[in-house]
Image (spheres, rainbow, N blue to C red):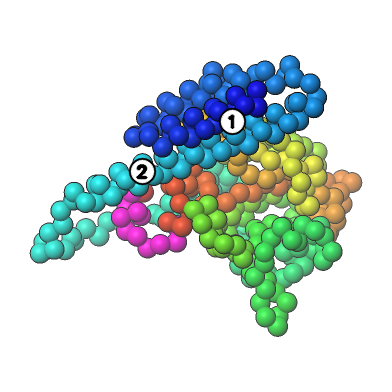
């Protein structure tokens, strides 16, 4: 089986190089890693192998599948680039033509998505709190169950302000403690804001981006309330019913913590589109019930009250909704891009 897998990998990678258009790539991709694809059929035999063989073949098959999927994605990008270059080469620009007088303005895609999200939650009785861009180490870390010795601090590369001990907020969660201490219970808060992380910039990462977070605190709050709230928001946003999938996740400020996926609204979960990478699911956000330590830091008795919180990148939501391929587009004043929305 090992030889068969390696042979298939070489054959597929070579074939991908010769594919000429997007439809050819998608059709061949389905023929290899789809539900009845060649690689999928081979992998069905793994269950009949010995334990030792399963360990070896399982790792090999997973590595091969990842390599093949990456090759498909790379080929799609190459084809798209060639198409754009060909289009530009054939376009004619008359440099003597008078300038356009079109002054019609458009909402930025992030603003448009945020307004839609805010409208949904205003109807549900949420109050909106703008997040602070500069905050203290206490609000950004300690109040969220992330003390100085906690390894979770290593997960986020923070911009520190020299001499002050303050930081550029790495998450809108830095507002949780402030809201808990300033608002009367029960609390239903929507917290949008710009956050900053010292990260390398590429198509899916930026050092400046927008987050939005929800926090609900009341008696008898459970994961059922959390799931209903997220499902309502996403169904409203994409104007179609979505299905949620919760997976265990670790986040120091919630317990239990979950990672939330939702069924792709573009292919209806049938794993036939690029948005969900042919999986039928879109990995989306963190969520969970607010950790008792966080409630205590906010002056709330965790024996009486409970709550949930969840949050995500607005940039990523806009990328999904409008099929935007590169997060860097949001920061560039490109009118050709902005006028599409």
Based on the picture, tell me whether residue 261 belongs to the magenta stretch.
no
Classify residue 35 by image quadrant. Answer: top right
Residue sitting at 42 percent across and 56 percent down? 329
Quadrant location, the N terminus: top right
Classify residue 23 by image quadrant. Answer: top left
Name the mark nearer the viewer: 2 or 1.
1
Return the residue found at the far right. Answer: 303
Question: In the drawing, what numbered circle is on residue 6?
Answer: 1
Give the distance between the C-alpha atoms of the residues marked 2 and 1, in whole angstroms. Answer: 29 Å
Can you see residue 218? no
151 is higher (above) or lower (below) than 43: below
Question: In the drawing, what numbered circle is on residue 80?
Answer: 2
Question: In the drawing, what numbered circle is on residue 203?
Answer: none
301 is higher (above) or lower (below) than 181: above
Residue sitting at 57 percent across and 51 percent down? 313
Give coordinates of residue 52: x percent, y percent: 80, 27
The residue segment tinted magenta is 330-340
Give coordinates of residue 312: x percent, y percent: 61, 49
Give SS at disc 1. Answer: helix
Closer to us: 52 or 311: 52
| Crowd tier of the residue under label 1, counting other residues whose Cα lies within 10 Å: few below 14, some 14–19, many 20 or above | some
Side of 37 relative to 89 (left or right): right
Classify residue 138 by image quadrant. Answer: bottom right
Closer to us: 206 or 56: 56
Give coordinates of residue 217: x percent, y percent: 75, 47
Give coordinates of residue 158: x percent, y percent: 67, 67
Side of 155 relative to 340 (left or right): right
Closer to us: 285 or 131: 285
Based on the picture, tell me whether residue 332 belongs to the magenta stretch.
yes
């Amino acid at each position: 089986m090992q030889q068969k897998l390696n042979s298939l990998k070489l054959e597929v990678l070579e074939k991908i190089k010769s594919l000429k258009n997007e439809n050819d790539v998608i059709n061949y991709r389905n023929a290899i890693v789809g539900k009845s694809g060649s690689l999928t059929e081979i992998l069905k035999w793994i269950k009949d192998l010995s334990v030792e063989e399963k360990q070896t073949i399982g790792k090999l098959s997973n590595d091969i599948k990842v390599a093949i999927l990456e090759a498909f994605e790379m080929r799609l990008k190459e084809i798209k680039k060639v198409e754009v270059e060909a289009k530009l080469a054939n376009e004619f620009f008359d440099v003597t033509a008078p300038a356009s007088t079109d002054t019609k303005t458009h909402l930025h895609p992030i603003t448009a998505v945020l307004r839609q999200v805010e409208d949904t939650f205003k109807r549900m009785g949420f109050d909106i709190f703008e997040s602070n861009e500069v905050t203290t180490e206490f609000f950004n870390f300690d109040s969220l169950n992330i003390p100085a010795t906690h390894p979770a601090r290593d997960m986020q590369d923070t911009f520190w302000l020299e001499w002050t001990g303050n930081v550029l907020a790495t998450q809108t969660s830095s507002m949780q403690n402030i809201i808990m201490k300033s608002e009367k219970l029960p609390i239903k808060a929507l917290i949008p804001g710009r956050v900053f992380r010292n990260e390398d910039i590429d198509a899916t990462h930026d050092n400046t981006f927008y987050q939005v977070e929800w926090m609900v605190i009341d008696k008898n709050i459970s994961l059922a309330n959390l799931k209903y709230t997220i499902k309502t928001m996403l169904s409203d946003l994409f104007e179609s019913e979505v299905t949620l999938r919760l997976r265990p996740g670790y986040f120091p400020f919630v317990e239990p913590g979950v990672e939330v996926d939702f069924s792709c609204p573009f292919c209806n979960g049938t794993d036939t589109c690029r948005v969900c990478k042919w999986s039928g699911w879109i990995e989306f956000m963190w969520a969970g019930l607010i950790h008792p330590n966080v409630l205590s830091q906010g002056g709330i008795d965790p024996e009486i009250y409970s709550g949930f919180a969840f949050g995500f990148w607005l940039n990523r939501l806009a990328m999904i909704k409008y099929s935007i391929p590169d997060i860097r587009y949001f920061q560039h004043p490109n009118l050709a891009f902005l006028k599409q929305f």
